[in-house]
Image (tube, rainbow, N blue to C red):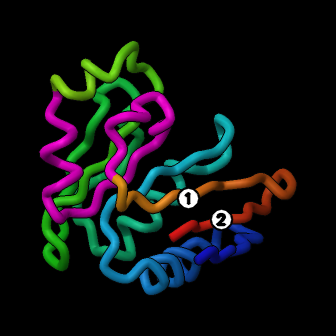
Amino acid sequence: MTKEIIVKRLEDLPCAAKEFIDFVGQRRVFSFKGKMGAGKTTFIKALCSELEVEDNVCSPTFAICNVYFSPRVGEVYHFDFYRLESEEQALDIGVEENFYSGNYCFMEWAENIPSLIPEDCTAVEILEIDEYQRKIRIEL
């Protein structure tokens, strides 16, 4: 099943995040694909806000993984695999344990760890319509 959400302005992100969370149901592992600057981290921030994350949500580009806390859903993992040189590096930080924890896991640049992505991972693609508008395509 596929769903597309159109985001016309930044102000639309909270509604888009709610629609996303409602649509995906009990799914917890997501890979976000999109060009550099497409808005992956920005949308993940909106999702974390919808999940009532209390921490400052920022790109884990150098840390590879940020862990946030939400009183509503517990720990939320945010990965950025852009700088990884091998899947072994991902294994070294324990990604498999996180993927199968039952907690929300948001992955950017998951295409850099193809053999580690869980089968039940939901693919999310962010496409640029123009300078401001984005199309968020969710594949269940």
Residues drawn in magenta? 93-118
Q: Position of residue 68 (x, y in %)?
A: 21, 55
Q: Is residue 98 positioned above or below 2 on the image?
A: above
Q: CA distance from mark 1 to mark 2?
A: 7 Å
Whether residues under marks 1 and 2 lie with C-beta atoms below 8 angstroms apart, the answer is yes
> Which residue occupies the foreground of this view, 72 or 87?
87
Q: Amino acid at mark 1?
A: Val
Q: Is residue 117 magenta?
A: yes
Identify the residue position indicated by label 2 in the image: 136
122 sits left or right of 51 in the view: right
Q: Which mark is residue 124?
A: 1
Residue at figure coordinates x 14%, y 34% from the top left: 94
Q: Which mark is residue 134?
A: none
Across the whole image, how many numbered discs are drawn on residues? 2
Residue at figure coordinates x 37%, y 83% from the top left: 25
> Which residue occupies the foreground of this view, 57 or 122?
122
